[in-house]
């Protein structure tokens, strides 16, 4: 008996992309003829929905503004074996999707990231390139490993990734959360270099370099606090302990000589800092136990689904 073909869903989050959505949908329908293409509109004020439907996509709407909110809705609503996610602005190459899907199935991966290769100057702003490298390095330093392009919106997921991923982000920091989810559960992942093109005329980037960069930085710090509490709170405790020792050291000679503390306020401050440092160490240890339990629950949810491409 022939093996059953996997159900493939193409997910395109969109906001005011009438200049590109029709061609984007057509490109993915041509590249993956057996796939169902979904366009999730995020309160567009132009003809995005109309043109997406005319191109053959199933159009749905998410009223809560923000890409993270759209991804949460897409992952909850759509049932498939393989999920292809890309932006609807025609910057990602639809012809790369079959190779990404094939790699996911052949190697039984849970995510394949389309790392962006851009040749056009307008495709990827210099500030965004620098920010991507900076945040990729930070993520690697904090979590031990990373991806070549953590902010790529072009990804292919397995069913068990999508259905075990509790989306908490609301905006463009969603790609960071996706990357950390894969790293924390030690999922098998892969990368495929894909072309990244400039937006067509009439399409504008929704990403704000500074405000969204700040939100991404806060997301990384928050996820590090949640997923690495011993290191996070232990680092704070160690800094407080070192500062307390620096403050207390000048008081030691006089105390050993006379048995009296010359600067009583400094001694109180140093003692308080040591107490807080000890509390930080114990808080990290307690929260690490909680984190381990949460990670085990997510791992069990992940294991409830078969590997992609398995019989």
Image (cartoon, rainbow, N blue to C red):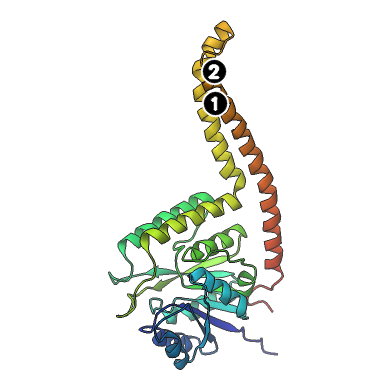
* Residue 25, quarter of picture: bottom left
Q: Quadrant of residue 256?
A: top right
Residue, x 52% and y 34% (percent of image)? Answer: 239
Residue 264's disc number: 2
From what the image shows, is residue 257 above or below residue 244?
above
Q: Quadrant of the N terminus?
A: bottom right
* Position of the C terminus by quadrant: bottom right
Residue 78 position, x and y percent, is: 60, 80
Element under label 1? helix
Q: Which mark is residue 269?
A: 1
Residue 97, position as x, y percentages in the image: 48, 79
- Answer with left or right where residue 311 lies relative to residue 137: right
- Image position of 9 with respect to 140: above or below: below
Identify the residue at horizontal 66%, vertical 86% (top origin): 4
Q: Residue at x 35, y 57 (%)?
A: 130
Q: Earlier in the sequence, mark 2 or mark 1?
A: 2
Closer to the camera in the image, 254 or 293? 254
């Amino acid at each position: 008996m022939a093996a059953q073909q996997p159900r493939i869903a193409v997910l395109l989050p969109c906001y005011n992309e009438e200049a590109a959505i029709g061609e984007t949908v057509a490109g993915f329908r041509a590249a993956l003829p057996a796939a169902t293409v979904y366009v999730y509109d995020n309160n567009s004020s132009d003809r995005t929905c109309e043109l997406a439907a005319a191109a053959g996509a199933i159009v749905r709407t998410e009223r809560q503004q923000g890409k993270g909110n759209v991804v949460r809705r897409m992952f909850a609503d759509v049932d498939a074996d393989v999920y292809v996610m890309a932006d609807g602005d025609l910057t990602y190459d639809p012809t790369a999707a079959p190779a990404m899907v094939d790699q996911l199935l052949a190697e039984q991966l849970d995510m394949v990231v389309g790392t962006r290769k851009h040749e056009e100057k307008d495709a990827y702003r210099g500030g965004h390139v620098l920010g991507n490298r900076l945040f990729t390095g930070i993520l690697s330093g904090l979590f031990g490993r990373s991806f070549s392009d953590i902010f790529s919106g072009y990804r292919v997921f397995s069913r068990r990734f999508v259905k075990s991923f509790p989306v908490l982000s609301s905006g463009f920091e969603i790609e960071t959360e996706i990357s950390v989810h894969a790293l924390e559960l030690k999922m098998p992942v892969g990368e495929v270099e894909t072309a990244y093109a400039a937006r067509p005329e009439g399409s504008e980037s929704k990403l704000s370099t500074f405000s969204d960069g700040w939100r991404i930085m806060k997301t990384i710090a928050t996820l590090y606090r949640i997923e690495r509490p011993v290191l996070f709170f232990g680092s704070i405790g160690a800094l407080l302990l070192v500062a307390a020792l620096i403050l207390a050291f000048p008081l030691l000679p006089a105390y050993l000589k006379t048995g009296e503390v010359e600067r009583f306020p400094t001694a109180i401050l140093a003692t308080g800092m040591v107490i807080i440092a000890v509390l930080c160490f114990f808080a990290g240890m307690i929260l690490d136990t909680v984190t381990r339990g949460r990670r085990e629950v997510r791992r069990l949810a992940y294991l409830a689904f078969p590997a992609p491409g398995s019989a």
